[in-house]
Image (cartoon, rainbow, N blue to C red):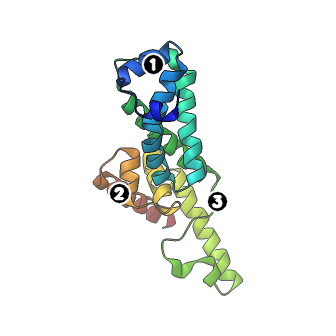
Amino acid sequence: MKRKDIKNSTESDKELVSGIIKGDVCCFEKLYWRYYPRLLTFVKGMVKDAGKGQDITQDIFMNLWNYRESLDANLSVKNFLFVSARNRIINHFKSRTRTSTVLVPEYPDIAPSRLSTPYDLTEFHLTRDHIMAAVTKMPQRRQAIFRLNKLENMDKEEIAKMMGLSVRTVDKHLELAKKDIKNALN
């Protein structure tokens, strides 16, 4: 079947998922080309990395095929794909923050490159270590929000959208994170 025919298929999502459950590769290809462009755009917009976005999107479709027997044709496959994408994006950022060791200062004026003496640099590293220790003691959601905002430089709106929260909730978690850090430094 030609790609043009695949893209212009008239079957409903329910019909395609029913075919996928039965192992119909043609139904899978039709569903793939129906949702791949939108899903890729969503993922790339969140991770800000085209290559990683493609990897995540491909993995989502691979899992859809690998676990096709557990699909339910009566449920929204579109919703399934985008929830899977959201979860993969969250896992992506969690894994990146686990390996990150340098805290990006909130104020660039105190970045290590601007510190003039070994004493200043030592103080900076000690403060950073205290901050990171305080961050690891935060509740998981607050910690994730703080890391996305301060280490990944994501704005509150992006975090809210990615985690399925309101901007006000993200703002409140950041406010509480600052209090936790302030208490740890006192």
| Element carrying mark 3 | loop
Please tell me which residue lies in front, 118 or 97.
97
CB of mark 3 within 8 Å of CB of mark 2?
no
Pick the front one: 108 or 17? 17
Residue occupied by mark 1: 71
In the picture shown, does residue 82 fall above or below 24? Answer: below
* Number of residues whose C-alpha sits closer than 10 Å to that of mark 1, classed few (under 14), some (14–19) or many (20 or more): some
Residue 2: where, in percent of width, then height? 52, 31
Q: Nearer the viewer, residue 46 or 180?
A: 46
Q: Residue at x 33, y 58 (%)?
A: 171
> Element at badge 1?
loop
- The kind of residue tagged 2 is Glu
Q: Residue at x 31, y 55 (%)?
A: 167
Label 3 – label 2 distance at C-alpha: 25 Å
Name the mark on residue 101: 3
**Image point 57% across, 45% down: which residue?**
54
Check the image and report above or below for 104 versus 60: below
